Amino acid sequence: MENKEISDKLKEILQLKYEPVAVKLVKKGEDIPADFNQPEKKTRHCQSIMKARTGECLVIPADKHACVVGGSSLGLLETPDNVRSGEFHSKIGMFDTPQAAAKMIEERAEFEECSMQATVVCPLEKADFKPDVVVLVDLPETLYWIVPAFTFEKGGRVTLSTAPFQATCVDSTIIPIQTGDVNFSMGCFGCRRTTDIGRDEMLVGIPGPILENIVEHLEKLYEKPIRKARGL
């Protein structure tokens, strides 16, 4: 299936409020897309996701990433010493000690430092590339259906990995890419402070390689379980 067809099916079956967001990380040495807009001001990864879910297409080079925490985990920037030590996050008041905050950073998923040079985000239907991951932002009931779509063939359980910070960069982008599994996030302090994500909204990241498979399973689920649960 082409990106637009996949996008149309996701929106129709799940009744999405927003566009599915295609995300691509541009490695060092690769060409940065020339036909995507760069933001005028420095932009956080979470902010770019929220812009893309309403239709914008953006390329954000490393020097345009506003959040050093997200940028460093994405392999775009060096990790500042005060982030590694936990000092940065403990000062916000979300941890009892710097050591507790440092443990979060120590255990986060991340790409090799400065191995990437840009991120590209846009609505999936407009993407002319194979996304590394597709991020959905919506209501819990809407995103719930990704769980049975993911387990439709292999069964088992879905393990959610999250933290108080880095809902879009780590939880919804890096973890799905590195593990090949879907991952859910309830949001985080940073994205809830700096974007327009709703208090009743959450996120899921779907690895690009399994996206078509997820959609095929959603189509089967829509034949009975989804319609029955929603009273359609």
Image: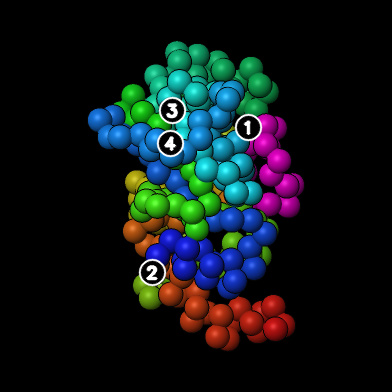
* Magenta residue check for 72: no
**Residue labelled with disc 2:** 1
Q: Residue at x 58, y 86 (%)?
A: 224
Residue type pointed to by label 3? Pro
Q: Residue at x 63, y 32 (%)?
A: 190
Residue, far left: 29
Residue type pointed to by label 2? Met
Q: Residue at x 71, y 41 (%)?
A: 196
CA gap between label 4 and label 1 equals 18 Å
The spot of residue 16 in percent (x, y) is 63, 63
Q: Tag 2: Cα neighbours inside 10 Å, few (<14), some, or many (≥20)?
A: few
Q: Tag 3: Cα neighbours inside 10 Å, few (<14), some, or many (≥20)?
A: many
Q: Would you say the residues marked 3 and 2 are in contact, meaning their CB atoms lie under 8 Å apart?
A: no
Numbered mark located on residue 43 in the image: none
Q: Which residue is drawn at 45% across and 56% down?
A: 206
**Residue labelled with disc 4:** 119
Residue, far top: 81
Label 2 SS: loop
Query: In which quadrant of the rendered view does residue 193 lie?
Result: top right
**Range shown magenta:** 186-202
Q: Would you say the residues marked 2 and 4 are in contact, meaning their CB atoms lie under 8 Å apart?
A: no
